[in-house]
Image (cartoon, rainbow, N blue to C red):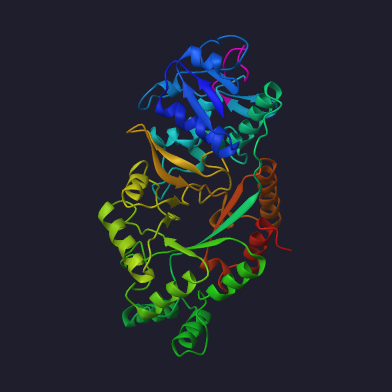
Amino acid sequence: MLLVYTQKITPRITYSFKHICTRILGVQVAFTSKIEEFVAHEGMKLSYGKQSLGNEIFIQNVDLLLEQGMTDIEVKVQEWDEVPCFFAVAENSSLPFDIFAATFYLLSRYEEYLPHVKDEEGRFPASESLAFQEGFLDKPVIDIWAYKFREVLQQKFPDFDFPKRSYATENVIAVTEAYCYKKKGIVRSLLGFTEDLLHLKPKYLLHRVQVLVKLKRDPYDVYDRIIRIFKKYHVPIKFMFQVSDFSTHDRNINHNRLEFQSLIKSVADYAEVGLQPGYFANQKFRALKEEKTRLEGILKRPVVSALNNKYNLLLPDTYNNMVELEFNNDYSMGYPEAMGFRAGTCTPFLFYDINFEITTPLLIHPYVVNIQATQKMKETEIEYKVLELKRQIKLVDGKFISVFTNKDFSEYANAKRNRNILKTVNDIS
């Protein structure tokens, strides 16, 4: 156990220390504001404050973890041992920056609460982030800091045996549109025929007819193929199905169709199934509750995981709604348009609500690669970037989470390239 002395124990301090020490390094942490208790402790210990008590490990703090709410913070990034860091402190600190305040700033997505320019979809874009602007979006800096912090602890307490963790992968398949042509209904099928004719798309017109008369498998019906790959190589996978009402934003088939429900149930026999909320469910609690209830009614089991793969992540409302509806896991933390570490970490972390200053029970699983980010990239560039991200994660024994869609493995996509990305991420030869 690591005992931390600090004059004032705040929710932010507790949150940041537990992510660094417990979630990444596997060390339990306790806090005290009593000097005599700290002095009497014979195990690992450090002080966190403005000045040290003696010759203990001392991390000098900035004010961020003692504050409440948001202020417009000036963040100056500097290099430390070839790693970007910020919130610099005095030389007598065991680290040259406040690792815990910097961790909180990135994990809480502090910058996303502040005024920023949104993209065309109304989202917080990668280009607005500190990590992108300072050139460390491709590094899991929090995990790197944590491993360097472990070295400091090991020098002071060489007899302590730190737990080891290992590199892992997880793959999420988002199903926004279960079928391309099947089960769309008469009106939508007729409109599709008309559109294919007007835009002179004979291939799609032919495929549409072949699928509807059951001479061809629907192009988006690739579920058996995906599951076979993951079963063969024992790779973890989750499917996130959308069961929204049809709208201009969400164009899946009707959730009441028996074949769609049968598909969801059959996939759930081999992999965990979660919810991909629709446009309105991302904004309104009632719509999210209705969609969760629908999916649970189909599966006859609780739905505890979700992925927002397309729409704006509204902080803190999106996550607070998930907490209230008893979701346990979220896979939305990443940039659809850019590879890298949106929250600066490759370790799952609990969501901290800055508005209420509380740590919620919702576990955020940050993804590193969303297949959307590769659309305008050359295959050699994709391979290089994926391998470099993988190398960075392996250095800190972290978790590489990737997000695909069922469409990415269809004949209308570059399925071969996408399978190669999947194989690279998961060490499949």
- Residue 91 in the magenta stretch? The answer is yes
Q: Please give the name of the residue rendered at 66% of the width and 54% of the height, measured from the top-left corner.
A: 382
Describe residue 263's horizontal placement relative to residue 131 as left or right: left
Q: Position of residue 251 (x, y in %)?
A: 37, 68
Name the quadrant containing residue 111. Answer: top left
x, y percent for residue 252:
38, 69
Q: Quadrant of the N terminus?
A: top right
Q: Decide which of 139, 360 is in the foreground and name it.
A: 360
Q: Is residue 149 left or right of residue 23?
A: right
Q: Quadrant of residue 197?
A: bottom left
Which is the main secondary structure of the residues drawn in magenta? loop
Tell me if residue 120 comes above or below residue 9 in the rendering. below
Q: Which residues are magenta?
A: 86-95
Residue 60 coordinates in the image, percent (x, y)? 54, 16
The front one of 426 and 350 is 350
In the orientation shown, which residue stands out farthest toward the left? Answer: 286
Q: Position of residue 319 (x, y in %)?
A: 37, 46
- Tell me the residue at 45%/36% (across/down): 109
Is 71 within the magenta?
A: no
Asked whether residue 144 appears in the rendered view, the answer is: yes
Left or right: residue 19 versus residue 312 is right
Residue at 44 percent across and 51 percent down: it is 329
Figure quadrant of the C terminus:
bottom right
Residue placed furthest toward the right:
429
Q: Nearer the viewer, residue 23 or 127?
A: 23
